[in-house]
Amino acid sequence: MPPFDLNKAKKTKTEITFNYYELPVRDVQKSKDFVSANYVGMVNEPNLIITKGIPQNYQAMRAYIFGKLHDIKGIVHDGELVIEHRSLTSSEKIFVCFLLRTKKTANSEIDTFLSNSDYDINIELNMDIDKTAPVIIYKSVLHDCTVVINTAVIQIKTDISAYSLDTDLFDVTADKYNLIVYDNTFEGFVAGGQEITNTDINGDLLECDMINVATDMVETYNIPINSEILGAKETAQNLSTGIIVVFSIFASVFIFLISNPIYNYIKTIRSLNSYFLPVDIRYNLLNGIGIQTWFSVILFTIGSICVFIIAVSGAAVPQPALLTVALYLAIVIVIPIISVNFHEMLARDGGE
């Protein structure tokens, strides 16, 4: 049977996701042919998701270490980590194979697995595997299962070359097989005027030409109207606007209530014949500056503080500058004038 050839494999739009978070390795068993152990994932957090239309979730059940099971053109490896999975929705069984190569200076979670047999350990394979590497997928006639091969090579320290080159778990060869690739891998490189893909790389140097990304390569993403992103943004905007409205009402009532007392207080100060200040200062402060000026300065300060508090309270989502200006003018100018005129009108009506 000829080796698997990435360049000849039929590409499929199937998507595959690996997630081997920290899991316990239990009951490690070693033989001259392979190493095996219980390696059980959580049902509510699948270790493997294969999507071709509807996502299918799979739970890791057992892990094996073999010698070189698959012959893949252009890829050198010494052995394979095989993880057995069960479907969470059917009786389907899937084996995922990760290619291993021994290197004395390497160190990985797989070495921890291989070096411990006397006690239980936990390993996290997410740190070792390449989740974006091209993946070979095929059906095994033996035991009617699916086999997945991640073509990225993981370097380990432990020598595994003596382990078996065959297994009775599944077929290690296949006439028909597909290739799952990630479109963004090597995107933008061209060789000899032709854009290259994951499978065009053969170890030779590539001549790279510039591509006009601004006009040809930019892809846009349209967010659906009913997406969670827009929903969360709209909720934040509504909450921010609501907070601003509430604070604005309180600020307006507050300014309305204090405007007339401040105005009357300023008039009272101007009428006092204070002997605690020198004549020139007393004249400039109390008589030289009009009531309206003092009134404006005080209300300007208080209104500015109120508008600042309102702006900070609604900072979750930036508000239009026009809204801030309108609030500022209303609190500093319009409401004080209404308040003073309102109270003077009441006073005239009472005097009559």
Image: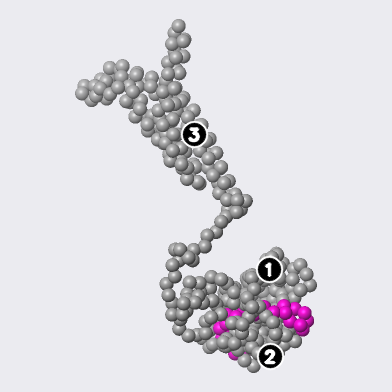
Report how far apart the C-alphas of labels 3 and 2 lie in the structure. 79 Å
Indicate yes or no whether the magenta region holds residue 150. Answer: yes
Quadrant where the image shows the C terminus:
top left
Residue at 44% over, 63% down:
214
The image quarter containing residue 1 is bottom right
Which residues lie in the magenta part? 137-160
Image: 323 above or below 49: above
Residue at 45% over, 63% down:
215
- What's the image's color scheme? one colour
Q: Which mark is residue 142?
A: none
Q: Which mark is residue 52?
A: 1
What residue did someone put label 3 on? 248
Q: Secondary structure at mark 3?
A: helix
Residue 320 placed where, x, y %? Answer: 46, 41
Residue at 65% over, 90% down:
2
Q: Amino acid at mark 3?
A: Ser
What residue did someone put label 2 on? 1
Residue 64 placed where, x, y %? Answer: 68, 82
